[in-house]
Structure formats: structure tokens, C-alpha cells
Amino acid sequence: SYRGRWSSDSSDSAVSTESECSFSRVVVIGENGVGKSALSGIFAGARDSMDSNCDLLGDDTYERTLVVDGERATIILLDTWANDEGSWTQEHCMQAGDAYLIVYSITDRASFEKASELRIRLRRTRQSEDIPIILVGNKSDLVRRRQVSVTEGRACAVVFDCKFIETSAAVHHNVQEMFEGIVRQVRLRRDSKEV
Ligand code: GDP
Ligand code: MG
């Protein structure tokens, strides 16, 4: 079952007990209808290997502790992006994240173009910061409605200087991998700062 993939397996006994309390605010952004809330809902609904429930911190904000590479990481996920251009909420989202999931739908080329716009805006808002970002091509299950190829998505991520993944919230494909990926990206940057 899907749930099984999130819950503990034998490797979790290797989890470090020195609990470095690390948490990251991850903001989900992207055009309307691309599946931001569907992806966030999976995050909110899944049980992690700590077997704790997800804490609902407020509207569209979720907190969950995952075990990634044997270490705990707490993510506070913000699904607060709204499509009102230049609103306070959008501005807040642009400022609030330690990391970003920029989501488009592989069935909607306009949403892919929107993703570029958002990347540029993020770069402008957070100049000089090296922010972990994953470009997410969602709805990979809708193969016959595909408008954006995997190659295009990957090439775009190279230009963006970020990671890339295709997901399907509908069939839960690569969703856990996406959240683990963002944790790893955050860690890479933190570790390189410590040196
Ligand atoms: P948001 O506006 O970005 O939050 O998008 P939603 O999460 O509300 O999703 C918009 C619509 O797309 C809903 O009808 C979802 O059920 C559907 N949807 C979201 N993710 C997927 C997916 O991976 N595959 C398919 N087939 N439909 C999806
Ligand atoms: Mg939504």
C-alpha cells in the first residue's frame, strides 16, 4: 500500500538519536490547478516513520517530521500560494520559504511558462540567496494529455539551477521522493555553509 511506503522499515532503527532540531519552511508555488493542494494533501495525510500525525498549523500549513537518510527533518509545508498577482500573500510566500517546490502540470504548457516566471521572481526577491528549489512536473499519470516533455522539464531545471522531478498526486508517484529531495537540497546547502 502507499501508506506502507511512508511508514517505518527496518532501516529506521539507524536514525540518529542526537536530535538536531532542524526544520525547514517549504513553500509550494505554481499556477492554479496544477496540483499544489493535492501534493500537499498527500504530505498532510501520509504517516511518517515516526508514526506521528501531521500537525495542522493553520489553513493550508502542515508540519511533519520525516526520516531522510537516517536523519530526522521537520518540514513546515505552506500551501498558501494564491493567484492574486502582487498580493500580500504572494509577497509573503516569496519571502517565507527556506525552500520551494515550483509546480506545473505536464498537461498545461501555460503552467510550465508560469513556472519560469516564478523562478525569475524568486531570484529577484531573494537575491544573493542560494535557495533550494525543485521544479515539479505534476500529473504525470495523464500521459495522453501531456504538453510538456520530460526533456523540456529537465532542461528548464538546468537553466533554473535547480532539481527536477515529475510526480503524480493522483497515483502517488514520486511524491515521497519529492519531499525527501527537498530535505536533501536543504541539507546540502546547510552542510556547505558549516565548512
Ligand atoms: P492547485 O490549484 O494547484 O492547488 O491544484 P489542486 O491540487 O486543487 O488540483 C487541481 C485539480 O487537478 C484537481 O481536480 C485535482 O484532483 C487534479 N490533480 C491534481 N494532481 C493531479 C495528478 O497528479 N493527476 C491528475 N490526473 N489529476 C491531478
Ligand atoms: Mg490549491
Image: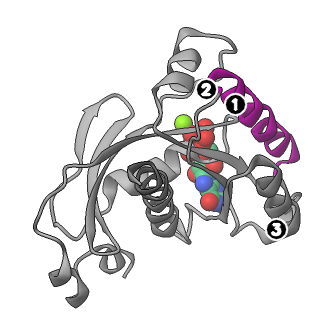
> As drawn, is 30 to the left or to the right of 13?
right
Taking the spot 55% from the left edge, 70% from the top edge, the residue there is: 174
Residue 141 % position (x, y): 69, 69
Q: Which residue is mark 3?
A: 150
> As drawn, is 36 to the left or to the right of 47?
right
For marks 2 and 3 on the same chain, the one whose residue lies earlier in the sequence: 2
- As rendered, which of 150 and 22 lies closer to the eye? 22
Residue 121 forms part of the magenta stretch: yes
Residue 162 % position (x, y): 68, 53
Q: How many neighbours does mark 1 have within 10 angstroms: few (below 14), some (14-19), or many (20 or more)?
A: some
Taking the spot 64% from the left edge, 21% from the top edge, the residue there is: 125
Q: Which residue is mark 1?
A: 123
Looking at the rendering, in which quadrant would you find the N terminus?
A: bottom left
Residue 179 forms part of the magenta stretch: no
> CA separation, marks 1 and 3?
24 Å
Taking the spot 39% from the left edge, 76% from the top edge, the residue there is: 2
Numbered tag placed on residue 43 in the rendering: none
Three-letter residue code for mark 3: Val
Q: Magenta span covers which residues?
A: 108-127
Q: Is mark 3 within 8 Å of ligand 1?
A: no
Q: Quadrant of residue 102?
A: top right
> CA separation, marks 1 and 2?
5 Å
- As rendered, which of 12 and 33 lies closer to the eye? 12
Front of the two marks 2 and 3: 2
Tag 1 near tag 2, CB within 8 Å = yes
Question: How many numbered marks are there?
Answer: 3
Helix, strand or loop: magenta stretch: helix
Q: Where ligand 2 lies, by quadrant?
A: top right
Element type where label 1 sits in the image: helix
Image vertical order of residue 8 relative to residue 163, above or below: below
Numbered tag placed on residue 126 in the rendering: 2
